[in-house]
Image: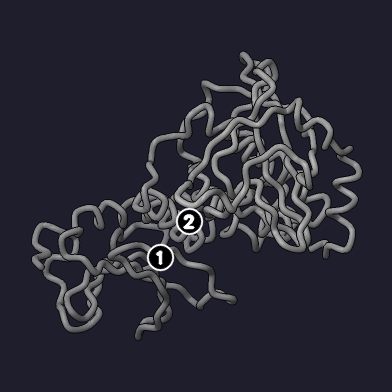
Amino acid sequence: MTLSDTPWAGLEAGKVDTRRVNASGRWSFFWGVMPKTDPVLLLKMTALPTPLPRLPKLRSLETGFMTLPGGPSHYIRLRDPAQVEIFETLCRDVVASAEKAEAEALTRAIGRTFRWHHLLRGGRLDRLSDEEQKGLIGELAILDRLIDLVGAKGALSSWTGPAGAPKDFELHGHCIEVKARRIAAQPWVQISNEFRLEDVPDHRLWLAVIAVDKVEDPFGETLTEIVAQVGERILALNQGLMLEWEMTLADAGFHEEDDYSDRRWVRAAAQWHVVSAGFPRLAAPVPNGVSNVKYALSLQAASAFLVESTEVEHQIAEGHPHV
């Protein structure tokens, strides 16, 4: 692999050789070459975080921590020589994002790498569509309420949908599927696959339907404002959740630099349904040879399963550790 015309040009192979990315930068980022001539981006730190944070797993890349003569470092290492150009773009993007942070460069660096994780596993870097914004707003509304019921850590840990789990929220003894719809829309919601309303052993399954509508300025709020409000609540209660919060947002496709100022939204209180025997649904197992079943669920047919929000919240909070 040739590294000429790249930031790694001239660095010595066979050992970890480094060159500072930006001499005037706030943080200690370095270009480096590891054994086997693999190019790396290093963030040198005074100490390793405890506990070590979850790191993204990217095809052709390795992320981790190691201790060098100058101290501990977080690294991103390229293993595929053919990808050096996009790797340089990734590295510069990680550094630029971290430089904007007043503190916690590691958090920003890892969070930004998760953004690339989202892109390289089939996501994209452009902003969320209106439908995706609406869906995220619905999930954030439930997350915001769960903070009151089970605490910031319990609520954020339960938000599993962005990571690709079959349910939007998974709590102790409860799972929640969230659907957002326009207030004036036909009384149907779209279910994306047969696993969304599938029973989970020893768990009560809830369907939360939230009306979310676009409005004109100065009414309502932008997606960015809604995200900021929920994030401020979480971090005010537990600053240590910053990395998990940013990684979950990255998995959800939200990035703070995207401009959402042209869309403002209002949302109503959630309508809760208990998904139990007789609920109108298609759930696994489906007939052999059939998969990825998408269908429209009639809210009128599901109305017999409506439950007061106070009852749902009592059941979720009961016996759940508030941390």
Residue 240 location (% of width, % of height): 65, 63
Residue at numbered disc 2: 111
61, above or below 91, in the image: below
Q: Which of the numbered marks, if any, corresponds to residue 141? A: none
Q: For mark 1, give the secondary structure.
A: loop
Q: Which of 118 and 168 is in front in this view?
A: 168
Give the Cα separation between the discs numbered 1 and 2.
Answer: 13 Å
Q: Earlier in the sequence, mark 1 or mark 2?
A: 1
Q: Nearer the viewer, residue 215 or 272?
A: 272
Q: How is the image coloured?
A: one colour
Q: For mark 2, give the secondary structure.
A: helix
Left or right placement of residue 91 versus residue 266 in this view: left
* Picture residue at 84% right of the left edge, 33% below the top: 304
Residue at the far front in the pictured view:
288
Q: Which of the two marks, 1 or 2, is nearer to us in this view?
A: 1
Q: Which amino acid does label 1 sit on?
A: Lys
Q: Which amino acid does label 2 sit on?
A: Gly
Left or right placement of residue 267 versus residue 288 in this view: right
186, above or below 159, in the image: above
Say few, some or many: other residues with alpha carbon within 10 Å of mark 1 (under 14 / 14 to 19 / 20 or more).
Answer: some
Residue 113 location (% of width, % of height): 41, 57
Q: Nearer the viewer, residue 317 or 12?
A: 317
Residue at numbered disc 1: 57
